[in-house]
């Protein structure tokens, strides 16, 4: 197949939605011709071949950070992406378009599907439908809801990665829509042994780790409060990621007297990220909502118990008392108690580590890619027949 992916973010831009698109594209490129149409910015090349995938970047304006887009840059992607996509379609014979994020990418994929008479598979990631931390979340605005509804209804197929995202399609948009569910996956991490001494930590410290963009939806200020309330002077928090809230979080850690125990590791490469996960004791997340939560899979692959809130797609594969602890949203007291208990109960901690390594085997990218591959073949066949 000749596959055109449309996604306004693609590594190194953006977060989990771009990462999963890259993993999916790279997995499929072993058997198919794969092109990505995404955003250009921050000195990135207009076109390149990356791990077997052709990456075409449409120029956008005003983007200032790798981790987070802003409204002007997202709006710019619409006309620039459509123009670049039409040039690609004129020069290539694509079989299918896979559009990631109903907003802001949806209008681009929809326009290109019409232009090239191509089937369009629309993958929704969760935050593009429902993000309680953003005033611009489409579910809060009548016009945006109508726009999203139109794009969902026009797509040849809709794919969600979790039951939570399927529910949000039906709750906030159109309950009559058929939505496929294909769980996401991660690349099997390469084993690369690390020691705590490599990163300046000692064996008698308790290391809590989190991964994510430093944005409001991740609510990482709660993790800093939790560390203070934990009452364990040997407990440290490792924050892997970058974003617009970093200075605010640093200030909070300083105000609480935790500057020496909250460690901002920055935007690391995959090798360093998994090394840091491997030397840690517990993965913690106070994210307010995740459409799926790739970071939880990465933690499981590193053999970490996971403590998080029970609101989002992660509830498809995380089970309270089995994979870690799943806590009611924003119950920080119970979250802190759960963390304290896992620190003291080494037997439970080890049992959950073993369980997570076993469970994550079904959630690697090759399984996800096979399901997408079958879906693409179905929509191509249906379009040809019509």
Image (cartoon, rainbow, N blue to C red):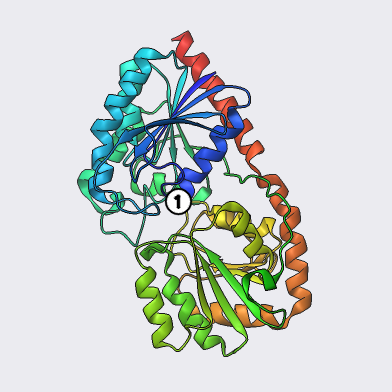
The picture places residue 359, in percent across and down from the top left corner, at 72, 53
**Residue 260 visible here:** yes
Which residue is drawn at the image coordinates 59% and 29% (left, top)? 28
Label 1 Cα crowd, 10 Å radius (few <14 / some 14-19 / many 20+): some
Q: In the picture shown, does residue 136 fall above or below 9?
A: below
**Residue in front for this viewpoint, 255 or 119:** 255
| Residue on which disc 1 sits | 15
Q: Quadrant of the N terminus?
A: top right
Residue 312 placement (x, y as % from top left): 49, 57
Residue farthest toward the top in the current orientation of the protein: 385
* Residue 221 in which image quadrant: bottom left
Quarter of the image for residue 84 reads top left
Q: Is residue 177 above or below residue 29?
A: below
Number of numbered tags placed on the structure image: 1
- Which quarter of the rendered picture does the C terminus lie within? top left
Decide which of 309, 93 is in the foreground and name it.
93
**Residue drawn where x is 51% and y is 45% of the image:** 19
Residue 18 in the image: state x and y as whole percent.
46, 44
Image location (x, y in percent) of residue 80: 26, 31
At 48% from the left and 85% from the top, the residue drawn is 258
């Amino acid at each position: 197949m000749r596959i055109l992916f449309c996604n306004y973010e693609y590594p190194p831009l953006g977060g989990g939605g771009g990462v999963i698109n890259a993993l999916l594209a790279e997995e499929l490129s072993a058997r198919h011709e794969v092109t990505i149409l995404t955003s250009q910015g921050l000195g990135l090349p207009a076109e390149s071949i990356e791990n077997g995938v052709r990456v075409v970047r449409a120029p956008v304006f005003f983007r200032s950070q790798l981790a987070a887009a802003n409204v002007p840059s997202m709006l710019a992607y619409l006309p620039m992406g459509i123009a670049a996509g039409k040039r690609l379609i004129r020069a290539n014979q694509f079989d299918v378009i896979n559009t990631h994020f109903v907003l802001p990418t949806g209008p681009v994929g929809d326009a290109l599907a019409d232009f090239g008479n191509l089937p369009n598979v629309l993958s929704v990631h969760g935050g593009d439908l429902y993000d309680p931390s953003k005033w611009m979340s489409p579910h809060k605005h009548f016009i945006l809801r109508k726009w999203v509804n139109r794009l969902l209804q026009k797509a040849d197929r809709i794919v969600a990665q979790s039951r939570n995202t399927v529910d949000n399609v039906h709750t906030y948009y159109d309950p009559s829509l058929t939505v496929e569910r294909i769980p996401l996956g991660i690349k099997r991490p390469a084993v690369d042994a690390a020691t705590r001494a490599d990163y300046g930590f000692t064996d008698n410290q308790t290391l809590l780790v989190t991964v994510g963009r430093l944005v409001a939806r991740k609510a990482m200020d709660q993790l800093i409060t939790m560390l203070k309330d934990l009452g364990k002077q040997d407990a440290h928090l490792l924050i892997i990621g970058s974003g617009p809230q970093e200075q605010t979080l640093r200030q909070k850690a300083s105000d609480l007297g935790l500057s020496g125990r909250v460690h901002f590791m920055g935007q690391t490469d995959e090798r360093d990220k998994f090394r840091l996960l491997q030397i840690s004791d517990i993965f913690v997340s106070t994210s307010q909502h995740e459409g799926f939560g790739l970071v939880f899979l990465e933690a499981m692959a590193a053999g970490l118990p996971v403590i998080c809130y029970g609101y989002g797609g992660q509830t498809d594969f995380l089970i309270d008392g089995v994979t870690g602890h799943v806590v009611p949203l924003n119950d920080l007291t119970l979250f802190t108690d759960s963390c304290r208990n896992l620190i003291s109960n080494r037997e439970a901690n080890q049992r959950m580590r073993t369980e997570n390594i076993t469970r994550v085997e079904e959630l690697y990218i090759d399984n996800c890619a096979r399901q997408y591959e079958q879906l693409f073949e179905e929509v191509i066949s249906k379009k040809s027949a019509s």
